[in-house]
């Protein structure tokens, strides 16, 4: 009982800001590009009341990001059938308060659906990317639908400029394995969520939730899949049970700098991106 109470309190805590940095070929000289990755709020669940999501949005805005990317699973669906549209609207409304110089871009997760698409379309921001790409400042952002929906990597990447750095935003990390061959002069980076970092990870026992869902070579942080550098966030919400143990909710701040340039600073993590 005490463990469950602790896990519930941990699930409701303010997210930690996990800072990463990476070199990305093709970025122009100048200040680093600050990208914030936010995923899996599952708003409306016991651990994610809407007022908590308001606080998280304010926390992201305080980081003064150049680019905000949302990796899906916006609403908590714990019932059979379609939730009322008003609940989906309440779940997505706080995200309209996110601010970034080069825009706020989103993809759908496996808990999202056509209603999510419709509601996003009624808001000026975030902009939902369903298998398409956009120019966002010095980079291109390509958004690919969840593999449980209408995922179409080839369509999403068709015509992407070869000389501009590419950020591929997906929900599930393993979607990197389905990316078509990319002949590029600039770097490519894949950002994802979905795994919750395991959500409940116990000493010696590991992460039981991910046992049930299958093995994840990319549970949290950096890894390589299909030859691509992939950065996975554990997200801010929960799934299945409103508990977090050993895996705090997190907001990822990724600072990108030109490959071959000077690398100075005190960021905790770094991964070269080709």
Image (cartoon, helix red, strand yellow):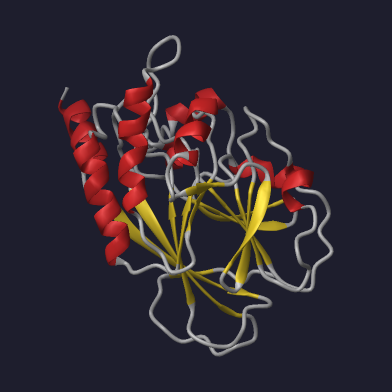
- Does any portion of residue 248 appear in the rendered image? no
Q: Position of residue 77 (x, y in %)?
A: 40, 21
Q: Residue at x 53, y 87 (%)?
A: 30
Residue closer to the observer: 170 or 226: 170
Quarter of the image for the N terminus: give it.
top left
What residue appears at the point 22 percent right and 42 percent down from the top-left corner? 52
Q: Nearer the viewer, residue 149 or 222?
A: 149
Q: Which residue is nearer to you in this view: 95 or 239?
A: 95
Q: Quadrant of the C terminus?
A: bottom right
Give the quadrant of residue 164: bottom right
Quarter residue 58 falls in: bottom left
Which residue is at 54% across, 43% downward?
Answer: 107
Q: Position of residue 40 (x, y in %)?
A: 42, 39
User: Can residue 144 be seen at all in this image of the molecule?
Assistant: yes
In this rendering, is residue 250 above or below 88?
A: below
Q: Position of residue 221 (x, y in %)?
A: 50, 54
**Front-most of residues 252 and 117:** 117
Q: Please tell me whether residue 87 is drawn above or below residue 263 in the rendered image.
A: above
Counting the numbered discs, the total is 0
* Residue 244 appears left or right of 75: left
Q: Residue at x 45, y 28 (%)?
A: 209
């Amino acid at each position: 009982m005490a463990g469950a109470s602790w896990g519930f309190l941990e699930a409701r805590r303010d997210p930690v800001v996990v800072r990463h940095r990476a070199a990305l070929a093709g970025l122009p000289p100048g200040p680093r590009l600050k990208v914030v990755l936010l995923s899996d709020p599952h708003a409306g669940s016991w651990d994610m009341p809407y007022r908590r999501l308001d606080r998280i949005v304010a926390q992201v805005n305080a980081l003064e990001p150049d680019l905000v990317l949302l990796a899906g699973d916006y609403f908590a669906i714990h019932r059979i059938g379609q939730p009322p549209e008003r609940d989906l609207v309440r779940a997505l409304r706080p995200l309209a308060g996110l601010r970034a110089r080069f825009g706020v871009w989103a993809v759908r997760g496996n808990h999202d659906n056509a209603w999510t698409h419709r509601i996003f379309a009624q808001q000026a921001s975030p902009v939902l990317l369903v298998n398409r790409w956009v120019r966002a400042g010095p980079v291109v952002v390509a958004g690919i639908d969840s593999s449980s929906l209408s995922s179409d990597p080839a369509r999403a990447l068709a015509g992407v400029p070869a000389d501009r750095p590419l950020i591929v935003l997906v929900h599930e990390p393993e979607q990197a394995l389905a990316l078509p061959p990319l002949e590029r002069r600039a770097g490519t980076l894949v950002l994802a969520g979905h795994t919750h970092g395991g959500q409940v990870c116990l000493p010696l026992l590991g992460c039981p939730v991910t046992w049930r869902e299958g093995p994840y070579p990319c549970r949290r942080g950096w890894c390589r899949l299909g030859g691509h550098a992939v950065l996975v966030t554990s997200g801010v919400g929960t799934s299945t049970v409103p508990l977090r143990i050993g895996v705090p909710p997190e907001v990822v701040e990724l600072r990108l700098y030109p490959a071959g340039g000077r690398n100075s600073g005190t960021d905790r993590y770094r991964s070269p991106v080709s």
